[in-house]
Amino acid sequence: MKKFTHIVLKNYRLVLVFILLGTLGNLYSIKQNFALETDLETYMPKSHPAFIFSDKAEAQFDIRDAILIAFNDPSGIYNPTTFKKIKDLTKAIQKLEVVDNKDDVLSLYTADNIRGEDSGLEIEPFFKRIPKTDLQFKQIAENVRSNEMVYRRLVSEDEKSTLIFTKIKDNSFSEELYEEILTLANSYEGDGLEVYVAGQPIVEGTMAILMPKDMKKMFPLVLLLIFVVLILVLKSFKASVISMMVVILSSIWTFGLMLGLGIPIYAPSSLIPVMLIAIGVADAIHMFSHLQLQTKVHRNWTKTQLIENMNTEMFSPVLMTSVTTAVGFLSLLSSDIIPIKYFAAFTAFGVIMAMLFSFILIPAALNLVGLPKSKLSNKSKSNTFSDKSKLLAVSLVAHKKIVFVSTILVLLFFGFGMSKVWINSSFLARFPDNNPLVTTDAFVNDHFLGTTTINVILESEESGKFKNADVLNLLDDLAIDVVSQNENVGGSISLVDFIKRMNKVLNEDREEFYAIPDDSDLIAQYLLLYEMSGGSDKLWEVVNEDFNMANLQIQLKNDNSKSLNATLNSVELYRAKFKDLGVNLNFAGSGYKVLVFNDLILQGQIRSLLYSFLIVVVLLTLMFRSIKLGLIATIPIFITTVISFGVLGWLNIPLETTTALISSIAIGIGIDYAVHFIDRYKIEALKHKNKTLAIQETMAHSGRAISFNAIVVVIGFLVLTLSAFKPNIALGAIISLNMFTSFIATISIMFIVLYVSNVFFNKPSKTK
């Protein structure tokens, strides 16, 4: 390493020019290729059987998430002004390029009103022209109330609100369309009418806007805070500036590569800059801390000697911490979630880049601008810190039993909290409760059947199976039970709703006929009559043309994973019953895919934890050439992992795509303190041949650096608590706690274990 540093110092101008040119190239890549991705579909592994089946079902039944626009008129919707706005907005949306056909826009102006007439079945919209008299409005209101397929689905129970459903083309949603929809919908506000826009595409669109705003807010803030803290702990403006350059450049090079490869920024990868700034600065802190101490001890050394000593002595611990940190992140490659894979790979790349810049940029920059003027020459202050560190080391050894017992009690408490951890991939849950998107979604859910859907797909090998009365009655029982057993389920729509409606209207609108006929032939006649009467293609959204495949769409009032799971459990009770009738039951749609997504997150977390622990132990064993040291070094990250998940459980914070990163971050970063501490302990042990003196000097040297490191990282991650997304807030708070925990665990329990294990000492030290 000394020879390498010598080459860097000799050619420092060329090195700095190369770094500058590389940085400019990466900045150009970022500018040219910048792209955000918030579509939940892109998070899914397309090769997973659940998604393969769901995609097939979605194509068959045209299952797409809808944009929901709600009109709310406190005086009631049945008036000329509101009806004109319903008609005009419906027609305006139908003209949008992203709308395939007019039937994709459902409102009172386009919805089928299935009625019985003397001549048979009549199907037409609830209105074509704007009614002019109270009598006409009264008739429409009565038609809506008596139509079970529309009442509470398109018109609220209090008759003050109505919905417009809009399906758009696949992969057509963009920030521009989002703005266009909002502008168009809001232009109809006024005259006492309130407009609410909700639905999954709107949630994703809002994220697309807030994500870059979040990044623009947090990135400079974390830079400023860490820079201020660096000045306070390193007491050198020059050292602080160079340290910040290391992390800024690693972030630029990481994003330049990622975007240059055509990989967009997902929600997890938006955290990479904050991660790299908070993590990458650790290398520079340890190197400058060592440089300052050596400058004080070796006052007669030249600038070149001091820089070469810094790079040489810090090479091993910085290399080890960077590799283990990268491994902690790379363990997330075992996840099936694509954005988490990208987050893992590019954060690991950024960590390695920060290491390389530390070994190259810091020496070159120091050779250009000179060594930092440190205030460590103030003897009283430096001695005070050193004396206190040594006193702490002696005190911990004297009270080692208390440290052991306290650690066990903490692990038991937070270990129990781990059992309370639950998973939630709700996109809406990412936003604060006072966010307009949350309040809008709440309004739609309060007044209608729900904004979240689960599709139950039923299949049979027998053509015409879903004209059979027994099968349809069982489907009807399922739909009724799911609604009655789950308070968050607002309602459902399926083939049985069409048949029950036709049976009722063709029998003089008598309520007792709102049921499935016992005669399968009569059911077949109803369906034929529907087609002959000019019914819309909505029928083919609930059954295929061979009538051997059906779709039951269940609407929920939130996308909470607990609600989704409870709904699926209710459906599963019918699986065996359908099997007895020769019908297979499956699931599809965005709501179901969110649940599969949850399971994949959990599985990925478990794999990530196991892999990262195993790999880190192996790496540390190889690095320290001792399996005992490898295991000792993992003590802080084991304690930190238990505490972090215990906090999630006790505080009822769900595990989702962002907070799922906690384990790898805890392991990746938390191990750094242990590596630096053990490496310094080894040096001091070989130097002094005295265990007590070794632990005192280690605490004075590495204890100083890792305390600086902990302060910077904790403050860096606390910036995430200012995010617009709740998971990021939780992540920032918990990771800050994790780093503090790792720091405390390193200088307490790991320190004690290291002491009593007599590692590096062939015989127990005579000094106790």
Image: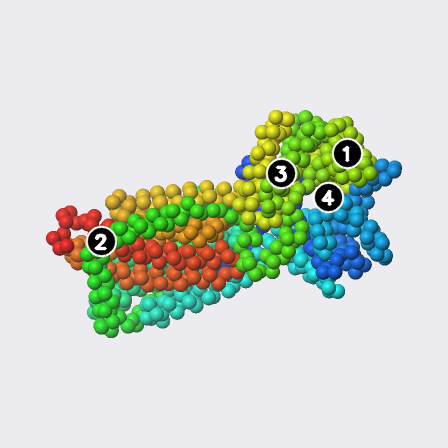
| 362 left or right, relative to 254 | left
Residue 662 image offset from top left, x and y in percent: 42, 51
Give the class, few, some or many, for how many residues have Cα within 10 Å of label 2's Cα (few <14, many ≥20): some
Distance (Cα) linking label 4 and label 2: 71 Å
Above or below, comparing residue 468 to residue 233 in the picture: above
Q: Position of residue 57 (x, y in %)?
A: 64, 37
- At label 4, the amino acid type is Met
**Who is closer to the viewer here, 141 or 762?**
141
Which mark sits nearer the N-terminus, 3 or 2?
A: 2
Residue 316 in picture, x, y percent from top left: 29, 53
Residue holding disc 4? 149
Which amino acid lies under the numbered mark 3 shown in the image of this protein?
Answer: Asp
How far apart in space, not on screen, are marks 3 and 4 (Cα)? 18 Å
Task: From the viewer's perspective, tell me whether residue 540 is left or right of residue 217.
Answer: right
Q: Are circles 2 and 1 on residues that touch, CB within 8 Å? A: no
Disc sitting over residue 527 in the figure:
1
The number of discs equals 4
x 54%, y 62%: residue: 213
Q: Earlier in the sequence, mark 2 or mark 1?
A: 2
Query: Which residue lies under the disc numbered 3?
Result: 481
